[in-house]
Image: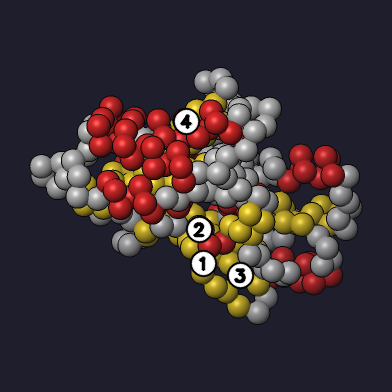
Amino acid sequence: MEVLFPRTLEELNTMRADSPDGLIMAGGTDLLVRLRRNGQKPSAVFCIERIEELQRLDILEEEFVIGAAVTLQSLLECETIKQELTALHQAIAELASPPVRHSATLIGNVCTASPAGDTLPPLYVLDAAVEVCSATGSRRQPVADFITGPGKTTLQAGEMVTAVRVPRPAAAMRSVYYKVGKRKAMAISVASMAASLTTDDDGTITAVKLAWGSVGPTVTIAPAVEEYLLGRVLSVECVRDAGQLAAAAVCPIDDLRASADYRRCVAGNLLLRLAQAGLK
């Protein structure tokens, strides 16, 4: 197996044409584990960390552009992301350990497409999209449409994700991420939830998006819960009723980490944290 280090996207495309079964590696924290577990031996692995175009972290007037080679640690250290994309920043802080965050990438978390991926619920509520490129062209697709199942995406042969694009939120919007695991650090989530919320001066909810992780085959959204919350003032009573709708909307499984019933209960209870935090 060859390990190759292209320096441009054009060079990468040429290498991929020569080794069509080759795999792209960003941080490798998921890929290398999968190769060892499955005994898979591609003809080549293409390490993209030296491609300058993919190292970009651009904060533009209307959006953030996060390149495929940008590490999670770089995002964690970005003050603008902390202030504006708070849910994503909180999710990254919860993800794995510092050594892993120095290698792992946001693109890798998206393309692994695990239902428990920490960064995925925030990307859903922040309306993130992926930029997909190949030798013949490029396209953009919302993250919510890009991920189609556990470990499954819409990527086709010869394509790769070159960036995640996240719109800069309105000043009044707030976002948050909550996670429940079997321990306080370096734990795969039993259930998680991201929320983006806008309220008016008297606390009435004028816009809301919610997404849950680890409670379905992909990130779960619940339009009925969002519709229930719209026009209401955030309170414990309000979110308790919404939590019952959320528990009915999710589709968790039993596994070694938790039962489906427990996950369903936690999914609803995570909404209570919104009221307890007084998110406005």
- Name the N-terminal-most of marks 4 and 1: 1
Cβ atoms at labels 2 and 3 below 8 Å apart: no
Q: How far apart are marks 3 and 4 (CA)?
A: 40 Å
Q: How far apart are marks 2 and 3 (CA)?
A: 18 Å
Q: Distance between the residues labelled 3 and 1?
A: 11 Å
Question: Of helix, strand and loop, which one carries label 3?
Answer: strand
Q: What residue type is labelled 4?
A: Cys
Q: Nearer the viewer, residue 229 or 152?
A: 229
Q: Which amino acid does label 1 sit on?
A: Gln
- Local packing at callout 4 (Cα closer than 10 Å; few below 14, some 14-19, many 20+) is some
Q: Mark 1 points at which residue?
A: 141
Q: Mark 4 points at which residue?
A: 265
Q: In this view, does 68 lie above or below 248?
A: below
- Local packing at callout 1 (Cα closer than 10 Å; few below 14, some 14-19, many 20+) is some
- x, y (%) of residue 48? 67, 55
Residue at the image position 76 percent from the left and 39 percent from the top: 33
- x, y (%) of residue 125? 40, 51
- Name the N-terminal-most of marks 2 and 3: 3
- Name the N-terminal-most of marks 2 and 4: 2
Q: Nearer the viewer, residue 171 or 238?
A: 238
Q: What residue type is labelled 2?
A: Ala
- Is label 3 or label 4 in front? 4
Q: Mark 3 points at which residue?
A: 133
Q: Mark 2 points at which residue?
A: 144
Residue at the image position 42 percent from the left and 50 percent from the top: 222
